[in-house]
Each structure stands twice: as structure tokens, then as C-alpha cells.
Image (tube, grey):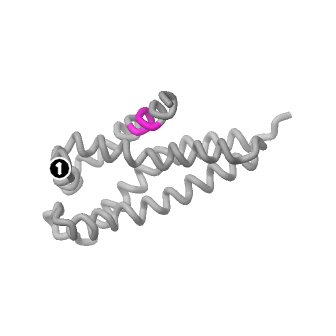
Amino acid sequence: MFDTLALVFGSGLVAAVLWSPILLSSRVRSLFHGLPPVRSTVASYLLVAIALSVPFAIGTGIVFTTTSTEGAALSNALLAMAFVLTIAYMGVLPLTSVIGLPRVGIDWDPTNYGLGTWLLLVTAALWYAAVFVIPLAFFAFLLALPTG
């Protein structure tokens, strides 16, 4: 149990550090500042960054526990999981931020949710996913190498 929590929180904290330059954008800072329950930019940012790591940690765990030990099969399953989560993040996170949050009363964008906000959020989602996809892709490449 401790190993699982360390994997999730550890990877989430690493992702938070690598993703932190998005906080240079005042729009992104206002998004995190407006999020409940803490309404603090740093606390909300850390909570979101760690929460977003959970699907990657769970997905990786599922791949390793349900896929055969054959290198190529494991490699393909890791890449497929990473691809699906990346596409989901690029769609769900911007939609939730621009459409969902204002509907529940969290009006966070001072520029009125224009194209720039959408591009910023899609880029931020892709960047976050890349923090996980790049090491997973490298590991999948190593798993696919012939052993012999």
C-alpha cells in the first residue's frame, strides 16, 4: 500500500515540478487560484498535479499486472495506455476548465475564454501528459528490444 501511495504521490510531485512553468501564465494562475476547496494557487496546483498523475499510475499498474511478461506485448500496452490518456487529457481538461468550471460558478478567465485560453489549456494538458509519456515511451522501447 505504501509503495502505491509513494508511486502516485512521488510521480505527481515530480510532474508538478516539471509542469510548473505553466504558472508563468496569469490565466493559469487565476484558474488554480479559483479552484475549491482551498482557493490558493500553490495548494490547488499541487492537488491538481498530483490528482492528474493518478490515471497514469493506475494505468501503468494495470498494464504490468494484466499483460503478459513478453517484452513487445508489454511495450505495446504501455504505449497504448499512454496514448489514450494523452488524448483524454487534451480533450477533457480544457473542456472541464472552459465549459465545466464556469457552469458551476468558477469564472476564472479574465480574457473571456477565447482561443488563446483554449490553446493554452490544450498545450498545458499535452505538456503534463508528456511528463509521463516520455519516460513511459522510453521504457516501452527498452522492453521491446530483443533479449538474447
Question: Residue 132, how many percent across, how many down?
Answer: 49, 45
Q: Main secondary structure of the magenta part?
A: helix
Farthest-out residue, right = 148
Residue at point 17%, 54% (across, down): 34
Would you call the spot at circle 1 few (<14 residues within 10 Å), some (14-19), or many (20 or more)?
some
Using residue 33 as the reference point, say whether residue 126 is left or right of it.
right
Using residue 120 as the reference point, say whether residue 89 is left or right of it.
right
Q: Which residues are magenta?
A: 8-12
Farthest-out residue, left = 110
Using residue 5 as the reference point, say whether residue 118 is left or right of it.
left
Question: Residue 31, how many percent across, how many down?
Answer: 21, 55
Farthest-out residue, top = 2
Using residue 118 as the reference point, say whether residue 70 is left or right of it.
right
The residue under label 1 is which amino acid type?
His
Q: Quadrant of the C terminus?
A: top right
Q: Secondary structure at mark 1?
A: helix
Residue at point 45%, 33% (across, down): 5
Q: Is residue 116 above or below residue 143?
A: below
Image quadrant assignment for residue 99 = bottom left
Name the residue that disc number 1 marks. Answer: 33
Question: Residue 3, how many percent across, how many down?
Answer: 51, 29
Q: Nearer the viewer, residue 100 or 111?
A: 100
Question: Residue 142, how many percent across, how many down?
Answer: 69, 39
Q: Is residue 128 above or below residue 1?
A: below
Q: Is residue 72 above or below residue 118?
A: above
Residue at point 58%, 54% (across, down): 81
Farthest-out residue, front = 1
Q: Confirm whether the magenta stretch covers residue 9.
A: yes
